[in-house]
Amino acid sequence: MKPVAFDYERPRDLAGAVKLLAGSSGAAKVMAGGQSLGPMLNLRLAQPQLVIDVRGIGELHAVSDANGSIVLGSCITHAAIEDGVIQDVTRGLMREVAANIAYRAVRNRGTIGGSMCHADPAADWVSVLPLLSAAALIEGPRGRREVDVEHFVTGAFSTVLEENEILVGVRIPKLSAAARWGHYKFCRKPGEFAEAIAAVLVDPDRNVCRAVIGATHSAPHVIEDAHFIAEGFDSERVLATVMAAGVGDDPYERQIHHTALKRAALRLNA
Ligand SMILES: Cc1cc2nc3c(=O)[nH]c(=O)nc-3n(C[C@H](O)[C@H](O)[C@H](O)COP(=O)(O)OP(=O)(O)OC[C@H]3O[C@@H](n4cnc5c(N)ncnc54)[C@H](O)[C@@H]3O)c2cc1C
């Protein structure tokens, strides 16, 4: 199948992109890397009248460092993070996550912002950024707002973005020198979407001991106090948490999410 006919615009700045989007009355789609939008267009799951290609907007590729955090522009690719072109303030976690997304051709074009906006529950950034207490920077006709990434994805393929808003970047707090993490992605072969994702973060200097269950059927499940995972691994409590995350009804799913958490905890403490 081929896409429906659509107009194509490539604005030079953010204001131009927001104006185009606001003027389209919901008939436009933003395009970043095109790695998810392309297939959706070809399958006619998306039938926009206008595609707004935002890759030429400098601000969406920028990196800025302020107040103990770093802001990554939404059009930064998975490959740039994997390669360390972008400073990694997460002691290697973001590089590991990026390197395990799909395969290199997809990572060369796919972006951190596109992945968040597409909001596939099995996606890697969708699952891991809430662990880092990241925030989404959003621009629309009424100006800029900031939303905790934990609340950005509201369900499968759905976010808090309004149809006239653009994700500008992601603010990521810097981990302290004492921070440790463990991350495990469960997939049948490299480059596939995950069947389960688990990550645990301990940052004593910032009083953080969090974990996340990702690749659920909806938004990821954040565990604010994860001492029962990070220290001693309380299997019974982990199973109850997997059930609470909505991935425990099926015995196979329950097992892989439980195992992913266990392996993430082992890596944390290795
Ligand atoms: C074969 C294959 C395997 C893959 N495997 C994985 C995997 O293992 N793990 C994983 O996490 N991902 C995987 N992906 C998805 C990949 O990471 C994509 O890069 C990502 O989902 C979308 O990013 P993109 O930049 O290509 O966005 P696009 O495809 O351009 O856009 C995706 C959606 O987000 C919207 N959008 C994009 N940018 C913005 C913005 N700045 N503001 C507002 N809306 C925006 C678009 O309108 C569209 O609805 C895979 C993709 C393919 C093709």
Image: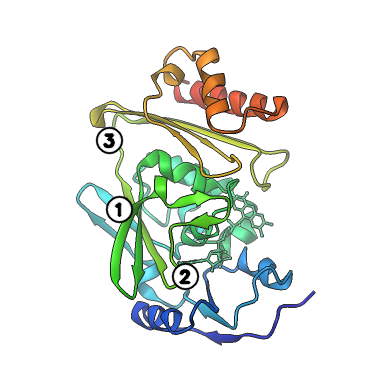
Picture quarter containing residue 255?
A: top right
Q: Residues within 10 Å of mark 2 (few under 14, many from 20)?
A: some
Mark earlier in primary sequence (3, 1)? 1
Q: Give the residue displayed 42% in from the left and 57% down from the top.
A: 85
For mark 2, what is the residue?
A: 163
Tell me: residue 232, above or below residue 264.
above
- Quick check: marks 3 and 2 in contact, CB under 8 Å? no
- Is the shortest distance between ligand 1 and the CB of mark 1 under 8 Å? no
Q: Are marks 1 and 2 in contact (CB under 8 Å)?
A: no
Callout in the foreground (1, 2): 2
Which numbered dot is residue 70?
Answer: 1
Label 3: element kind? loop
Q: Position of residue 230 (x, y in %)?
A: 43, 20
**Is residue 78 among the parts visible in the rendering?**
no
Q: Residue at x 56, y 85 (%)?
A: 8
> Looking at the image, do the residues carrying marks 3 and 1 touch, with CB atoms under 8 Å apart?
no
For disc 3, the marked residue is: 176
Q: CA distance from mark 1 to mark 2?
A: 26 Å
Q: Is mark 3 within 8 Å of ligand 1?
A: no
Residue sitting nearer the eye, 94 or 213: 213
Check the image and report above or below for 104 versus 47. above
Q: Nearer the viewer, mark 3 or mark 2?
A: 2
Residue 204, x across and y down, in percent: 28, 26
Between disc 3 and disc 2, whose residue precedes? 2
Taking 104 as reference, is 221 left or right? left
Q: Amino acid at mark 2?
A: Glu
Estimate the x, y position of residue 30 in percent, counting from the top left. Answer: 51, 73
User: Spatial distance from mark 3 to mark 2, Cα to Cα?
Assistant: 37 Å
